[in-house]
Image (cartoon, helix red, strand yellow):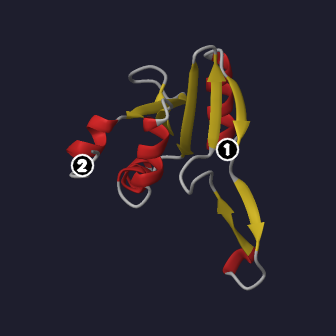
Amino acid sequence: MTPTQRTLRHLREQGYRTAICERWVPRPDLPGGGHKLDLYGCFDLLAIRPGEILAVQSCGVNHAAHRRKLLGERREAVLAWLAAGGRVQLISWRKLLVRRGGKARRYQPRIKEVTLNCLCKAGVDAG
């Protein structure tokens, strides 16, 4: 199961209606034959429920790189989304022990809400 599939399941369990915004763009001239294109260059999923719209960047364990992307190179898109009244979350997935001392592991989400305050703390002028 991919991080996107895990995130979709998690959001649906929270009562959201979800949609995938990330798509594959074929480009034979690129290594791998193409690249993925996110909504506004930073969001993989949209989730809605009454009175709320949420944009989500979903990833595996590499939380820090995606956080830098949202707070750095894609900050204008994040600011526009937040200014429009939307919420932004970064959801990464890691395998953790189910019980201390045991061997069984289960994927657990690490959820980081991205706010204007996060952008300011990252040294970005949010005003």
Determine whether the residue tagged by mark 2 lies in a helix, strand or loop: loop
The amino acid type of the residue labelled 1 equals Thr
Residues packed near mark 1 inside 10 Å, few (<14), some (14 to 19) or many (20 plus): few
Q: CB of mark 2 within 8 Å of CB of mark 1? A: no
Residue drawn at (43%, 37%), measured in percent from left and top? 83
User: Image quadrant for the N terminus?
Assistant: top right
Residue drawn at (51%, 31%), measured in percent from left and top? 86
Position of residue 66 measured from the top left corner of the image (x, y, whole percent): 44, 52
Viewer-closest of 14 and 75: 75
Q: Which residue is mark 1?
A: 2
Establish if 27 lies above or below 106: below
**Separation (CA) of disc 2 from disc 1:** 29 Å
Q: Going from the N terminus, do you reach mark 2 or mark 1 first?
A: 1
Determine whether the residue tagged by mark 1 lies in a helix, strand or loop: loop
Establish if 36 lies above or below 34: above
Q: Image check: 102 left or right of 7? A: left
Q: Which residue is mark 2?
A: 122
Viewer-closest of 15 and 86: 86
Q: Image check: 103 left or right of 33? A: left
Tell us which disc is closer to us: 2 or 1.
Answer: 2
Residue drawn at (62%, 54%), measured in percent from left and top? 38
Q: Image check: 29 left or right of 91? A: right
Q: Which mark is residue 105?
A: none
Q: Quadrant of residue 82?
A: top left
Q: Quadrant of residue 104?
A: top right
Residue drawn at (68%, 21%), measured in percent from left and top? 12
Position of residue 11 measured from the top left corner of the image (x, y, whole percent): 62, 24
